[in-house]
Image (cartoon, rainbow, N blue to C red):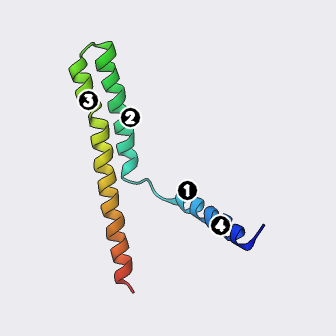
Amino acid sequence: MSVLQQDDSNAREKIDEVADQAPMSAGDPIAVAAVASVLFAWYNFYIRGEKQTGIFVGLWAPTMLAAASYLQQKDIIRKFKQGLASF
């Protein structure tokens, strides 16, 4: 195993450690809500037979995920800029 491969595996281990210790992000509850909206959409579409309601509710999931992604990206950019300002 070369030195580069050892450094790469050490970096991966450190990334995994940080990820395990990271607090729950704002996107995690949104992902749960998105899954719940998909299940609710299927319920409306297939069980209740309300196809328009099912389609409408089904569109909530990508909207919530897109909004959460946007907010997370803005937070990352803000933190990045704060880090650069300290130099």
- Disc 3 to disc 2: CB gap under 8 Å: no
What is the quadrant of residue 57 in the picture?
Answer: top left
Q: Position of residue 37 (x, y in %)?
A: 32, 32
Q: How crowded is mark 1: few (under 14 residues within 10 Å), some or many (20 or more)?
A: few
Residue visible at 22% across and 28% down?
A: 56
**Are the two marked residues, 2 and 1, in contact with CB atoms closer than 8 angstroms?**
no
Q: What whole-number distance in Å separates the C-alpha atoms at marks 2 and 4?
A: 35 Å
User: Dot 4 lies on which element?
Assistant: helix
Give the quadrant of the C terminus: bottom left
Residue 54 lies, with reference to residue 49, above or below; the image says below
Q: Dots 4 and 3: beta carbons under 8 Å? A: no
The numbered disc on residue 20 is 1
Q: How far apart are marks 2 and 1 (CA)?
A: 23 Å
Neighbor class of circle 3 (other Cα within 10 Å; few <14, some 14-19, many 20+) is some
- Amino acid on which the number 2 mark rests in the picture: Val
Q: Give the SS element for disc 1.
A: helix
Crowding near the residue tagged with mark 2, few <14, some 14–19, many ≥20 C-alpha atoms within 10 Å? some
Q: What residue type is labelled 3?
A: Val
- Lower position in the chain sequence, tag 4 or tag 1: 4
**Residue at the disc numbered 4:** 8
Identify the residue under disc 3.
Answer: 57
- Marker disc for residue 35: 2
